């Protein structure tokens, strides 16, 4: 396993209990001279989300730190829910995040071995075929306060079990009529140990093994042994598997195979965000979003399309830490890491999202000049560019008020402001349409303020972005907001579903934006800070001449809050 970027090591570098555990195992040579081996084991039943990014950073990051290796293993034991499309997207997303695997593995590659081991347990009297229905098995299972009841089939002879299990495999019985169960303890305080199901009958084609199998192993029977086959030393997973740890150990112990060890850590939960492949699939299927890579989705492909970067996601995951109890992380923290990254790396450009025409009455007719603009003030090596300026430009509608509210420092009649990199201008008058809507603002400029520099030390309180009308290019701008309206989407009223908490206004499309001409050549994966507006990237829907930009994040706009409060 190698990280394509040394920064990704930072994702797991801070000391935490997982790190300390591995360090201790290395010190005591728990696994002799074997290398540290981890795995990332997604089920290919959906696209990866940012929660998986945490698991990936832990699995790959920790192995890397200790000179170990990481396998990507598809936990493909549910043929009905799994698809090649998901396999492909998962590989793509892991790589995009900055990681590469030692070996590509599939639980289905182990079906023969798992079956042999099941026979071994049957022959040892440690597994039996049960004819109870799923409902009956549930009823016999008991509760946390009551022990379970033995199935009447629990006392079948080894010969009978061998006969029935091989016939299950041979396809003699319909779906759901029989299962193979481990014979453990129907009174165990841990319900997972009350004779867990190992195999179910399912006449379903598997995307890799085709129709070879009509019995499929359960997660608990497949996972630990797959780890063991790959000689995984540290099998890390989320806390909901804590109660499964005894069964993970039981199979390994009773089969006498390589002793992989499971350790649990907290799931990443983020406010205003739903992290569950099953529910995300529902959003896609019900067309509540435009596919898995809708820029509002918390999927890695959605975040990518939105303009998020792997560097920022890794830094966020590292900063959110690892714990033994589940908690919740503010989405603002993720946004902070993304802003921080883009602030350092994104080139600046000027774009007017909601244009208002500004006519400079004393600017020579037909004159065009080119003003110099820094591409990134945070990074002088990004250079400068020339931006055309003329006597008719666009400014944001919000940057002009005919009657300015208190503390409004932008353009208003008689007020002087700076046009970024260009000139000082003073608003003089407005032109309105029949409905009384302002369609043009007229102003004068001070030729001595070229470059936006004060000619005589006089100060202006505002610097505004602009785009020359004659040179502007048009583009569609997609403004995204939070997908959920509630910080905890699972905070539900009686009878509500989590999807009832969707934010009805999570997408706004602007079709009249005016952009500086340099943006005409923007490419996929280019990222920009539209000055004073936010961070943007090109959407894959974009075609030359018909550009589409996604807003990754707004710049923090403290003014919006003040304006709202004062009711202006
Ligand atoms: P989901 O409920 O979204 O389908 P899952 O846990 O079923 O998630 P898997 O494909 O089984 O998804 O997960 C692969 C790995 O990713 C597992 O080790 C799992 O523990 C981990 N993982 C999944 N969701 C999160 C999360 N929110 N935070 C951290 N790790 C996660
Ligand atoms: Mg799962």
Image (tube, helix red, strand yellow):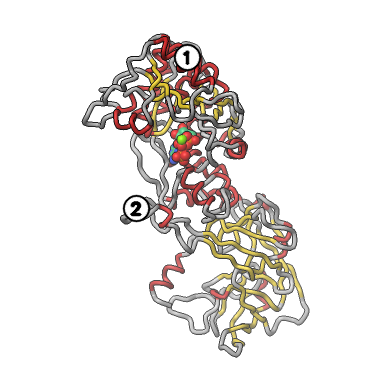
Q: Which mark is residue 117?
A: 1
Could you tell me which secondary element the residue under label 1 belongs to? helix
Q: Is residue 418 left or right of residue 520?
A: left
- Residue 159 vs residue 239, the one in the foreground: 159
Viewer-nearest of discs 1 and 2: 1
Measured from the top left, where is residue 221 in percent x and y? 44, 23
Left or right: 147 in relation to 437: left
- The C terminus lies in quadrant: bottom left
Q: Is residue 523 visible?
A: yes
Residue at the bottom extreme, as displayed: 434
Q: Give the quarter of the image for residue 170.
A: top right
Residue 217 x %, y % = 48, 25
Image vertical order of residue 217 relative to residue 341, above or below: above
Question: Which element type, helix, strand or loop, lies under badge 2?
Answer: loop
**Quarter in which the N terminus is drawn:** top right
Query: Which x, y percent locates residue 467?
Result: 67, 70
Between 222 and 66, the residue placed more toward the observer is 222
Q: Earlier in the sequence, mark 1 or mark 2?
A: 1
Of residues 328 and 8, the one nearer the viewer is 328
Name above or below for residue 47 compared with residue 438.
Answer: above
- Measuring 61% from the left and 39% from the top, which residue is drawn there? 85
Q: Residues within 10 Å of mark 2 (few under 14, many from 20)?
A: few
Please tell me the numbered disc located at residue 491: 2
Q: Locate residue 444, reporting x and y percent.
A: 64, 83
Could you tell whether 369 is left or right of 357 in the image? right
Mark 1, residues whose alpha carbon is within 10 Å: few (<14), some, or many (≥20)? some
């Amino acid at each position: 396993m190698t990280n394509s970027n040394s920064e990704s090591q930072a994702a797991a570098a801070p000391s935490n209990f997982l790190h300390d555990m591995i360090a201790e195992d290395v010190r005591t040579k728990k696994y002799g001279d074997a290398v540290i081996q981890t795995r990332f084991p997604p089920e290919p039943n959906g696209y990866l989300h940012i929660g998986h990014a945490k698991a990936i950073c832990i699995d790959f990051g920790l192995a890397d730190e200790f000179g170990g290796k990481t396998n990507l293993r598809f936990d493909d034991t549910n043929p009905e829910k799994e698809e090649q499309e998901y396999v492909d997207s998962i590989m793509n997303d892991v790589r995009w995040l900055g990681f590469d695997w030692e070996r590509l593995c599939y639980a289905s590659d182990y079906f023969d071995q798992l079956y042999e081991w099941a026979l071994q347990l049957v022959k040892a009297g440690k597994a039996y075929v049960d004819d109870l229905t799923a409902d009956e098995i549930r009823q016999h299972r008991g509760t946390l306060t009551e022990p379970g009841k033995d199935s009447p089939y629990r006392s079948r002879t080894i010969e009978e079990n061998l006969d029935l299990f091989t016939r299950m495999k041979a396809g003699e019985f319909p779906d759901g009529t029989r299962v193979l169960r481990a014979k453990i303890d129907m009174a165990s305080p841990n319900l997972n140990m009350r004779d867990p199901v190992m195999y179910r009958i399912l006449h379903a084609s598997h995307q890799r093994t085709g129709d070879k199998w009509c019995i499929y192993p359960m997660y608990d029977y497949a996972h630990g042994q797959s780890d063991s086959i790959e000689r995984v030393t540290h099998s890390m997973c989320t806390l909901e598997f804590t109660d499964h740890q005894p069964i993970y150990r039981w199979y390994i112990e009773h089969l006498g195979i390589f002793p992989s060890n499971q350790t649990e850590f907290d799931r990443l939960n983020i406010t205003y965000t739903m992290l569950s492949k099953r529910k995300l699939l529902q959003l896609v299927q019900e067309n509540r979003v435009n596919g898995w890579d809708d820029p509002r989705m918390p999927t890695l492909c959605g975040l990518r399309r939105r303009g998020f970067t792997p560097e920022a996601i890794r830094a966020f995951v590292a900063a959110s830490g690892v714990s033994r109890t589940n908690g919740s992380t503010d989405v603002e923290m993720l946004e902070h890491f993304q802003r921080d990254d883009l602030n350092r790396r994104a080139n600046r450009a000027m774009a007017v999202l909601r244009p208002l025409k500004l006519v400079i009455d004393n600017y020579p007719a037909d004159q065009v000049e080119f003003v110099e603009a820094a591409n990134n003030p945070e990074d002088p090596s990004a250079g400068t560019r020339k931006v055309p300026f003329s006597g008719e430009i666009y400014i944001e509608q919000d940057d002009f008020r005919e009657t300015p509210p208190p503390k409004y420092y932008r353009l208003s009649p008689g007020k002087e402001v700076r046009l970024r990199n260009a000139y000082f201008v003073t608003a003089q008058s407005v032109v309105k349409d029949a409905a009384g809507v302002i369609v043009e603002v007229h102003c004068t400029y001070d030729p001595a303020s070229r470059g936006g520099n004060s000619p005589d030390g006089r100060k202006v309180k505002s610097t505004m972005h602009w785009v020359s009308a004659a040179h502007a290019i048009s583009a569609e701008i997609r403004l995204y907001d939070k997908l959920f309206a509630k910080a905890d989407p699972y905070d539900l009223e009686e009878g509500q579903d989590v999807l009832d908490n969707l934010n009805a206004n999570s997408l706004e499309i602007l079709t009249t934006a005016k952009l500086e001409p340099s943006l005409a050549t923007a490419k996929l994966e280019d990222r920009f800070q539209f000055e004073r507006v936010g961070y943007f990237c090109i959407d894959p829907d974009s075609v030359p001449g018909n550009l589409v930009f996604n807003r990754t994040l707004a710049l923090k706009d403290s003014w919006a809050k003040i304006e709202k409060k004062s009711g202006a």
